[in-house]
Structure formats: C-alpha cells, structure tokens
Image: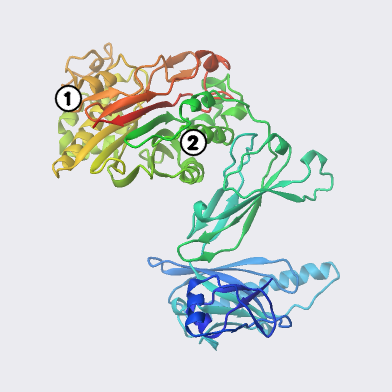
Amino acid sequence: MQRCLVLGVGRRLLNNQLFTARTCSQCCTVTERSAALSHYIHRHQVTRVFCVLSCNNNMSFNNLNVTCLPDDETLKISFEYSHNGLPARNFNLQRNKNELLGQSLLRLRANMSRFLNKCKKKKKERNAIPKVEDEDALPISVWRDDHQLSDTTPNVEAWTAGSELHIGDKVFHVLVNGPAVNKLIIPSSMMVNFPVYIQMDCEFTDITQCTVTWYRATKKDSENTDGVREWQEMSSSTVYSPTMADMGHRLKVKCVPQNMERNLIGKAVTAESSSVVNAGPGYCPFETRHQFTKEKTDELRIRVVTYNILADLYSDSDFSREQLYPYCPAYALNIHYRTPLLLKEITGYNADLICLQEVDKKVFEHDLLPDLSLSGFEGLLCLKAGQVPEGSATFFNKSKFKLVDKHDIVLSEIIESDSRFKDILNLLECNEQLMHKVLQKQTIQQVSILESLDKSGQLLCVANTHLYFYPTADNIRLIQIAVCMKHIEHIIEKYKSKGQNISLVFCGDFNSDPERGVNLFMTTGSIAADFKEWKLNGSTDSILGMNLNHFLSLSSGCGYPVYTNYVGGFNATLDYIFYDNTCFDVAEVVPLPDDSEVVLHTALPSVVFPSDHIAQICTLKWKQ
C-alpha cells in the first residue's frame, strides 16, 4: 500500500492527515479514515481525490512532531531522518517560540551537516562512498499551503499543524503535540505465569490508548549461535503472561502510540528484553487468597486492601541482605523480582480501594500507576517529607469512585504551623528532647476525599499513613495518631457543615499491636493523660501526657489476626483497616495465608512473599 497526501480542500480541511490509498496512479480511491473527509466528499460530489504522490515520484513523506505547551517558552521539534540509505538518526531541536524560523533552520543545517559528514567518514573507511550533499546543497525550508514560509516567521507561527518541513526530496508533515513514546522498556525480570507489563515514557497518550504487540524469539538464547534473532508474534494484548513455552526465549514488544480524542497515530517504537523468560517461583500463597476475591464487588460494597509492600529503598542494601533478611535470597529481595509478584498479587484481589505503604516513587510511576490503570484504577502518591523517595499511595476503582479533593499533610509541619494543634505543641515543649524527635520525623498522612458512584450523595474520606517504627516509641506514635485523627475530624466537620454525608476508612501500617495505645485510641475514642505509654520506663523521652479524644466510632475491618508482619525473630499485628461502623458493616474478610506457608522459607519476605508484611483485605458494605 502506498501512503499519500490528500490535495486541495481535503488537505486543508484535515490539516494534512495521511490516508491509505488502495491504488496509486494519476489519481486514486482513498480509504476514508476520517468522517470529516467522507462528509466533504459526499457534500461536494467529489468522485476522485488527487494525490501528491504517484508511483514514479521521488518525494517521500514522514511525520515531524512538535511539542508546544502553553506555559513553556520553548518548543521541541523531533523527527527521524535517513539519507541515501545511510543509518537513520533522530534529530531533536529545542528552540524559543519567538525565535525567527531562519535561526532555527540554521541550527538544523549545522546539526545535519555534522551527521552527513560523519556518515561520509564511515563510508570512506569502508571504501563505499555514496553521494552525500553538503549542507548548502541540501535545501531546508518550511512550507504551508504550497507556499514557503519566510525566515522572519516566528517559530510559534511556523511550526503549526498543516506545515511541512522540506529537506531535499523528503517532506515531513508537522504534527503538534502528537502522541509519542520516548522510552519503552521490558522489565528485566520475566517469569512464567507472571504478567509482564511494559514500562514507557510517553507524551499526549497513555498505555490504554496504545496498540501493543508482543513477539517471542523463535530460538532460545542457548540455541541462537549466530546472534541474529527472528521473531514470532505472540499476543496483541497490553500485558503478556509468559507460558512454559516461552522459557529461555527473549521477548520483543512493539508499541504504536495513539491519541483517540484527536484521531492521531504516532511513530511505532520497539523494545527487546535484556534477558530471557525464567521459570519463576511457581505457585504463591497469595494465589490461594485470590480464590476469595475472584469476583468484583457488587454495588454498595467496597473491597479494601492495605499493604506495606517493602520499599526498595530499604530492601536493597547490604544491611537488609545480611542483617534484616539474611534468610531471603538476594535475588528475591531485588525490586525487579518482587514487582511482578506484587502486581499479580494486588490485581488479583479485585479491590475497590488499595492503600499501600513504603511505595518507592520510581515503582509508583513506572509500575504501579500505569499497570493498575489498566485495571481501571486512579492512583495518588504522597511522599514522606524531606528527600525521602518513598511514601504512601492510594488507588481507587474509577467505576466505584471519583476524586473530589486531597488533604495530605506532613505531621511534624502541621503541629508547628496550625493553631488547631497548639495543645500537642504545648505538650511537646515540656520535653525538648522528645519535641526534637517528633518534629524531625518525616511521617505523612495521605487523605483523599472520594465520591461514591454507587451511593448517591455519599462521600468517603480515605486516610493512609505509616507511623514511626521504633519499637519503644509508643508515645511518639500516640502523638502522631492524635494529629492524624484531629486532621480527619476537621475535614469531616468541614464537609458535614455543608450538609454532605461523609464516612471514613483509615488504612495503614500503624506499627502498633492491638494491645497498645494506637488501636485503643482508634477503637475507644480516648486515651487518658496517665496512660502508661506516655511514660517510657523512666526514659528521657517520657512526658506527663494529655487526654486524647475523637468523636468517630471506628472498628478494625480485619479484626486482630495473629500477625501481619513476620520477619526473623519478630512477628506482630501492625496493619489495620479502621472503618466507620455507623456507616459500614464488614461483609467479608480474606483469610491470611496458613502459618506453614509463612514459615516455609523461615520468614518474610521470601521467594513467594514479596514483602515482609501480609496484605489485609476486607469487604465493607454500606448500611442502608
């Protein structure tokens, strides 16, 4: 099939859209890929559409992408150029919008001159020199509506939809903010029966709009002696789950970016895996838990997951490998091994709300957010204070909820800056050493306000946190949970004052077992000033204490299992889903893995458990 450009009214109407011609001669029948063109042809009784290109014409056509954003002073010009059979090269220019076109073309000529001269040198070394023009002999210009634009035209007016860049006998059609894939990567860890999600950096598109095709090398790496790979198409799905037949083979993926709203298709990009498909761990205990979550929830039910997924920031160190988790093979601690397990586990729970802790920024951006979006989730990340690249993430099913607002806080900052917390600040000022410790903590509380799409007029406040971990710091955790609850009460009161119905689900790793103050405060609504955890056995961090209260009626959605965290020498229940029991009933709780599965590899994490915590899952039912 020949690619051709529609001339005349069709061309101006569609800003140089490309169409596929069924025939190519003096004139051709065009496959109408645009409703606008079809309507125009019918209205004006056009029976034949003439083409710029015929079989004996030497002109060739390509696309050139211009990235031009309203708030940016520059625009970016990108295209791929090949000359006389020489290797193609990507050219990228970033120029000021108000710069004159002539200056930009001067820079482009200089860049192309270096490229062509380098090609000359390589060909000369091979004793095969093709005809390569100097930059002065290679005309470069920008055209629109069959007229060459003046060199005094500002860039912002020159590089618009409908313009063309002419370089010798090549024509590049300008697409403004066209869909593009800048980076495409297949994860290095590919295992049988674990979905492989591509990682991509893209503009003006997303993974849900792209066309993805997967290929497998026809030979295993061990059988490929000449290093030349041939490929067999395997799947056209966005996600590929390797089978036993793929073991030992490399994979390749092709991604064609599209922008559905603007009916644009960008340049296809391919990527090959850097390794082969491996066997993987086989059956994982979380797959037994999936038997309880095969189906999505009905209306008026919400399946909630809270899960500390063990940040790569903390697992990827000699201390973690040698001291914290010496029983876990180093490869199983690697985030590239754990990520496929985490994704398969989390997606298999068919949740409506997912609250995660210890989420690396890079894992959120490259894995969790794009991959969970394929399952219909929207995700939010709240990083800890300072330069810590991990935090808490909340995902919600877009078929159940829509985002109304966010009220994230850094606990230490709000204590000092907000008068509502003056009583807590006064308490801390009684012990300067403790105050310093509390105000140095980077703990955050992520708070998202969602509107239920099942229950009309109902809002849901979803809170997510990870309290300070140190074993003897019970009083610090009491202060932190008091700040969290005071912040939540303020938010709920604000919405209720507007006459809106709002409920609460508060998830997290609270680093406190059920017998201690955090859980008692959450479920009873109060802690006395003389509560034992204010005083730490004579420690210099002890304080006199204060009365803590909140007005919400909360319960633990998963009850109190024996443990939710299991590492060498320690296990305890630290993770909770607290819910408003005036608005919800618990419909289901997903059982924990059997104890024998947890200790089979000594402790967590292991080759079949991607974290040292166990996900807590329950289904809440709105009360009528």
Give me the residue at 40% from left, 43% from top: 379
Image quarter in which the N terminus is found: bottom right
How many numbered marks are there?
Answer: 2
- Considering every residue shown, the one lying at the far right of the view is 127
* Crowd band around label 2 with a 10 angstrom C-alpha radius: few (<14), some (14–19), many (20+): some
Q: In this view, does 4 lie to the left or right of 611?
A: right
At x 33%, y 46%, the residue is 402
Q: Mark 1 points at which residue?
A: 549
Label 1 Cα neighbours within 10 Å, binned few <14 / some 14-19 / many ≥20:
some
Q: Quadrant of residue 389?
A: top left
In this orientation, which residue lies closer to the viewer: 284 or 68? 284
Q: In this view, does 22 lie to the left or right of 286?
A: right
In this orientation, which residue lies closer to the viewer: 541 or 451?
Answer: 451
For label 1, the SS is strand
Mark toward the start of the polypeptide (2 vs 1): 2
Q: Where is residue 559 in the image (x, y as percent from the top left)?
A: 34, 19
Judge whether 285 appears above or below 380 on screen: above
Please report the residue visible at 58 percent of the width from the left and 17 percent of the height from the top.
Answer: 601
The reply, left or right, for residue 391 in relation to residue 9 is: left
The reply to whether residue 443 is visible in this rendering is no
Q: What element carries label 2?
A: helix
- Circle 2/circle 1 CB separation < 8 Å: no
Q: Is residue 583 above or below residue 561?
A: below
Marks 2 and 1 sit apart, C-alpha to C-alpha, by: 37 Å
Which label lies toward us, 2 or 1? 2
Amino acid, disc 2: Thr
Left or right: residue 164 versus residue 278 is left
Please tell me which residue lies in front, 410 or 253. 253
Q: Residue 8's spot in the image, x, y percent?
A: 54, 85
Q: Where is residue 458 in the image (x, y as percent from the top left)?
A: 24, 41
Residue at numbered disc 2: 347
The residue under label 1 is which amino acid type? Asn
